[in-house]
Image (cartoon, grey):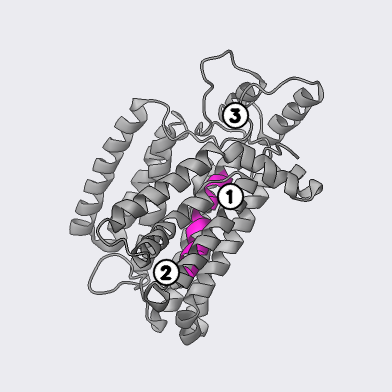
Amino acid sequence: MEQTSPTPDFSVPGDGRLPGPTALLREAVARGIITDDQALALDRLVREGGTAPDEPRDDERLRFVTGFADIFVTLGLVLFLGAATYFGYEHLGAVAGNALVAVLAWGLSEFFTRRRRMALPSIVLLLAFAHAGFSALAAALGVTGHGMPWPDLVGPHPFQALPLAGAALGAVLLVAAHYRRFAVPITVAAGAAATAGLAYALILATAPAFARSALAGLLFAAGLAVFALAMRFDLADPNRLTRRTDIAFWLHLLAAPLMVHPVLSKLARADGGASGAMLAVLAIVLVLAVVAIAIDRRALLVSGLVYAGIAFGSLIRAAGVTGATVPASLLALGVFILALSAGWHPLRARVLRALPRPWAARLPHPIGA
């Protein structure tokens, strides 16, 4: 859903040089002067004319802050909305209290997102709006647990499944309305998360035993679906000029733990951390590294690093090193991350050359293809 109204600038500024074509296109999109599709068309025109790129083409670029003002405003928002949440619960109850916070978050977005286009405050306000809206709906529909004012999502009972589905559906509609108004890139990931919750709640309502026993598989399937959606946005903007690339970043950040955690957590617990299982964990992490390099997205790999550290620790302990297992594990993990970071660009060129040429040419920043 494309918009031409002013939206938060989530792109990254240049390095002090005169702005080149790519930087100008990003700024024009951020200010609502041109649309995403027009930016892509202009970028193709520049490249067909032989103009050299004005910046590196194979790095993830995302702006969280435009200056210290973003941090200062975010601090104020956290304090204000946190206090509003507390007083709302105390004096209005869970439903009205959360609804109040959602209304406040929307109202503040009108100024800090739509008018000021501040990146970090926009992210915080979206998360506050989505959480408060979902919590208000869940409380109104009776999805609570242990006397707490927020929904119990750890293990809802079957009779709570349909109310949970209703709250999730309401959250999807709320974040869709928020995106239509403000177009904050992380909103699409929030909507995807709410949709995954809706699907799980519906499965829980119809087959509660299956939903609990197959939770890991359902999470993995949801991760694959979110990953496919992220790649759709990535492939639509291979030069990473428009809002689509920021949407893809947040979707990858959501998809990664959904795919990685169910598989690697089960392996990490297998046979009390046996060497074979730990080697399998490291093999999967290496596969994730190859995929992350191919699509030029580090988020997919970062989610597996915790389990890679656990695997390194188990293997080091199995080798007889018991006195310094944690430092040795951190050392091995640090070496792996630094080596991968230092060799990211040449490794990516090799991976893309190994892929079929039509595939490599469609991936973001098709260097070496």
Secondary structure under tag 1 reads helix
Residue 355, x across and y down, in percent: 74, 50
Total marks shown come to 3
Distance between mark 3 and mark 1 Cα atoms: 31 Å
Secondary structure under tag 2 reads helix
- Whether 82 is drawn above or below 138: the answer is above
Query: What's the magenta region?
Result: 247-263
Distance between mark 2 and mark 1 Cα atoms: 21 Å
Mark 1, residue position: 292
Residue mark closest to the camera, 2 vs 1: 2
- The label number, if any, that marks residue 268 in the structure image: 2
- The label number, if any, that marks residue 61 in the structure image: none
Question: In terms of image quadrants, where is residue 91?
Answer: bottom left
Q: Is residue 203 visible?
A: yes
Q: Amino acid at mark 3?
A: Gly
Q: Are marks 2 and 3 in contact (CB under 8 Å)?
A: no
Mark 3, residue position: 32
Q: Which secondary structure class fits the magenta region best?
A: helix
Q: Amino acid at mark 1?
A: Ala
- 21 or 84: nearer the eye? 21
Q: On the rendered structure, is 237 left or right of 146?
A: right
Q: Amino acid at mark 2?
A: Ala
Q: Quadrant of the C terminus?
A: top right
Q: Earlier in the sequence, mark 2 or mark 1?
A: 2
